[in-house]
Amino acid sequence: MKLMTKEIEKKIPALYSQDGKDPKDVKIAVKFFTPTSNWTWLITEGQKQEDGDWLFFGLVDGHEKELGYFTLNELASVKGPFGLGIERDMYFGEHTLSEFMD
């Protein structure tokens, strides 16, 4: 599965564009997850880098929940059991960051 599409690229707000907004007003552009564990990455902002990679900001829900930066290449390099990698949730609807923060 392709993690990034042209449609998603258009949908992701620029880095820092939502800085300071209330989490209930911050929309999640895309959700990535691992099918073999409970890790999830919720992208709220991103920017294409000079080398073609993407730098994202969003909520990472793994061992604990935290906001942070990560790249598309980092996500694409993850391989779990049976060679399964990160997947994109193709059926993820419209959600805000506040729905996933405790």
Image (spheres, rainbow, N blue to C red):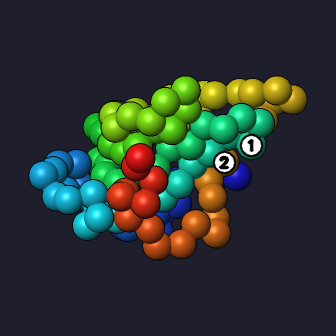
Q: Residue at x 32, y 49 (%)?
A: 46
Q: Secondary structure at mark 2?
A: strand
**Number of numbered labels in the structure image:** 2
Query: In this view, which residue lies farthest toward the bottom?
Result: 94
Picture coordinates of residue 18 (x, y %)? 19, 56
Q: In the displayed structure, does residue 22 sit left or right of residue 64?
A: left
Q: Nearer the viewer, residue 67 or 12?
A: 67
Left or right: 15 as drawn, with respect to 45: left
Circle 2: residue type: Glu
The residue tagged 2 is 87
Secondary structure of the residue carrying numbered label 1: loop
Res 52 seen here: no
Considering only vertical position in the picture, is 12 above or below 58? below
Residue located at (53% from left, 54% from top): 31
Give the label on residue 94, or none. none
Q: Which label belongs to residue 35?
A: 1
Q: Name the residue nearer the viewer: 96 or 52.
A: 96
| 31 relative to 27 in the view: left or right | right
Name the foreground residue: 23 vs 85: 23
Q: Quadrant of residue 90?
A: bottom right
Asked whether disc 1 touches disc 2, contact meaning CB atoms under 8 Å apart, the reply is: yes
**Residue 23 seen by the camera:** yes
* Residue 37, x across and y down, in percent: 71, 35
Q: Is the residue marked by circle 1 packed among few (<14), some (14-19), or many (20+) residues within 10 Å?
A: some
Identify which residue is drawn at 44% across, 68% down.
95
- For badge 1, the amino acid type reads Pro
Image point 38% across, 64% down: which residue? 96
